Structures are given as structure tokens and as C-alpha cells.
Image (cartoon, rainbow, N blue to C red):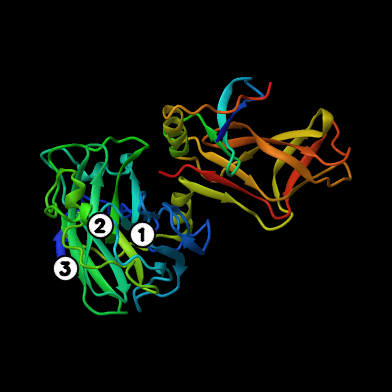
Amino acid sequence: MYKLIRNSISNKIDTVKRLSDNAYIPFDEANTDYQEYLEWLAEGNTPEPADE
Amino acid sequence: MTRAVDVAGRELPPNTALGVRNLIINGDMRIAQRSTSVAGVTANGYYTVDRWFSVCSPTSGIGTWTDEQSTDVPAGQGFTHSLKRTCTTADASPASTDIAQILQNIEGQNMVSLKKGTANAESATLSFWVKSNKTGTYTVEWRDSDNNRQICASYIISSADTWEKKTITFAGDTVSPFVYDNSSCGNISFNLAAGSAFTSGTLATSWASRNIANLAVGQTVNLADAVNNYINITGIQLEVGEEATTFEHRPYDMELQRCMRYYELINDSNYNSYGVMSGGTSQFFAGCIDYKTIKRATPTITITGSFLIQGNSNQPGTTGMGTQGIGKRSVYISGTGAGSNVVNGYSYNLLDVNGYIKVDAEL
């Protein structure tokens, strides 16, 4: 499971938090954790929304 | 004037790197930022020595393992550490798609010297020291994941519980170049056990399109077939050319820096400063922490354990530590101070009690 994280400076959502170990994963296609997240999304899953 | 250089008894022109010629990082297993020993390994992952990835079959599992940074090394070779995998729960009959490996993923842009995919493609030689209680035939695969190609080889451990040096030369590949970027172009995999799906073909001893049936053909050893089976390996070197030169003992700080491009554990001793934080409203604080090395890619950040923020005559603990922005050079983190001691506009030192920050940009 994942939760979207909003960058407090840019106010853009550019990170996702992996809830199993509280790892913050940036939206970088060269990051292997982000690649796993994209696979998880492709399986039809949906992350928790970012805090407002 | 270009002078020939005596390498392995041959006069060779210095047209390949004489320093930093080992394409493998942490081949002598000295760097272990994550841990020096992890028991109960049943899943793929990075556990102990940096850059070395343990494969434990992504499907049905193949035994249980302890991974460790061992001090058992071949005598008189200048090594201080090896990587050891020990079977702690056996799997005498692996399923067809079960496989156990030790591998290193390699960044594409570090492989330009091989001239792969050109008429001048270079041969490369893999050398390493290995020891196991299990004698027999083992296999190695060099996987080109950019082009879905492979070349493989076998080697024999002849004497149980005895360090042996192995050398394998791979021909150059004139067909397909690596992609010279910051992603993995493939890996060198040492097979420890393999089901029939990996052994039913013909060992791919020349570069060819990848077929998993051809990657471990002839592997007689199933290192998972009994408890306490083990393998130690160190001195792994992959270099351009058809000769295995003496292992390149690089300075510790150089090797650590190279490892930190992929993974950095920020973990100073207790109560050392990680960086300066600025106080905000409602006990909020935030600040930037620089990495020691620029990362391969924007890394995953994990913050664990307890911290304090010191300043304004107080040392409140922290809660809710997280990131506000992640870059390849630094991470901007934030949290909330305990009590009512964080003052808006004041500066604080972030100190660890038993906390650490994992910065992970591994391949």
C-alpha cells in the first residue's frame, strides 16, 4: 500500500510513501522502488490520497 | 611516448584503464553499510555487503539463508572480507522456476570500455575466489538486460572447504551495445541452485538472445539441498581483455564513495549533528541534509529511530519525521518537536539518538 505525498515547497505531489516501511519514494523512473510502484498501479491498485 | 606495460606476464599497450579497471564495485566485500549478517533470508534483496543482491527465487522460494560479511578469506591475497551465504532451511528438490543467486547489477554508463555492439567489441575476463563445502559444477550468467541477451559459463569447485581462484573469459559482443545511462544494463549472476527451467537448454557460452533455459545448464550443485551448505566468495573482478590481472585493491574511501552512489546510510554516532533545521509554527521544523555522494537516481528515503533537535536551550524529541523534497544531492526533511520547545524562526541541530536515514538509489 502507498500514500501520495505533497511537496510542501512546490505544493506538487512528487513522492509516494510505501506504508509497509514508511519509505518515501520519489517520482523518478530510474528509481527501482518507483518502478515497483508503477507496476502496482498497473495492476489496478490505487494509493491513498495526499494530505491537503 | 606510449610505453607497453607488463600485465600478467604480457607486454600490453596501456589502452585500457590500469586504474579503476574492475567493472565490479565492492568486489572484495569490504563495504557493508546495511548489516554484516542477516538471517532468515527467503526473498530477493540487498542484505549485507553493498551492491550484492541476493536472489531467492521470485516464485515458490528456495530454502532459507543467512547472508553475512565474513572474515574468511583466501590467505595471502590481501583480502579482509568475503560474502558468505549459508543454507539454514533446505530445499532438496527445487521447483522448475526456483533459483538462488548472488548478483551485481551494473550501471550502463560504466561499461563503455567494452565497446559492446561495435566491430571492436572487447572480451572481458571475470575472476574471483570461491569456497564451498559443495564440490561440483557451478554456473555464471552475464545478462544484458538492455538487449535481452546473455553469455554464460561454468566452473568447478574441486575441493571442499578450500579457497580456489576461478577465471572466465567472455568474448566481446559485436551485436548490441549497452545503453550508456544511469540504469542497469544487466548483471553478473553467480548461480547457487537452479530448477529445471534454467538448466533444460544449452549453456549460452556465446552472446545470444536470452533464454532462461540456457543460463545454468550443467549446474550440478544445489546449494540449498542441505542445512549448513555454504559458499564464500570474494575478489570478484570483471575487466576488459582476455587476461585476469591481479585484483585491484582500491582505497577504502574510494570504494565506499562508489557504493554510496547507490546506497548511503546516514548514521553517525549518537548525538552527532545531521544538519541544521529551522523552527516553524506549531512545533514544525524542517531542513536540508546533504548526502556524501551524488546519487545514481533520485533515491528512496527511509527515516528510522529517534532524533532530537537541539537549540534554544532545549532538546526536544521528534515525531512525524518525513521528507518534503528528495533530490540526488540532498533531502529536505521535516518533523514536529515534542512539547512546546520549537520556536518559529530559530535554528536547531538535528541529532540522532538511535536514528538513521537510509538513502537508496540501488539498481
Q: Residue at x 84, y 36 (%)?
A: B342
Tell me the amino acid under the disc marked 1.
Ile
Name the chain letter of the residue that bears numbered label 2. B
Q: Is residue B270 above or below residue B186?
A: below
Q: Is residue B354 visible?
A: yes
Q: Residue at x 32, y 74 (%)?
A: B132
Discs 1, 3: same chain: yes
Gap between marks 1 and 3 measured at Cα = 43 Å
User: In terms of sequence position, does the residue under pointer 1 or pointer 3 come before the other?
Assistant: 3
Gap between marks 1 and 2 measured at Cα = 9 Å
Tell me the amino acid under the disc marked 2.
Gly
Discs 3, 2: same chain: yes
In-image side of B97 versus B1 (left or right): right
Numbered tag placed on residue B9 in the rendering: 3
Gap between marks 3 and 2 measured at Cα = 41 Å
Q: Is residue B35 above or below residue B116?
A: below
Task: Tell me if label 3 and label 2 are in contact, CB under 8 Å.
Answer: no
Name the chain letter of the residue that bears numbered label 1. B
Task: Tell me if label 1 and label 2 are in contact, CB under 8 Å.
Answer: yes
Residue under pointer 2: B195
Where residue B38 sits: x, y (%)? 50, 62
Task: Categorize mark 3 by other alpha carbons within 10 Å: few (<14), some (14-19), many (20+).
Answer: few
Name the chain letter of the residue that bears numbered label 3. B
User: In terms of sequence position, does the residue under pointer 1 or pointer 2 come before the other?
Assistant: 1
Assign a secondary structure to mark 1.
Answer: loop
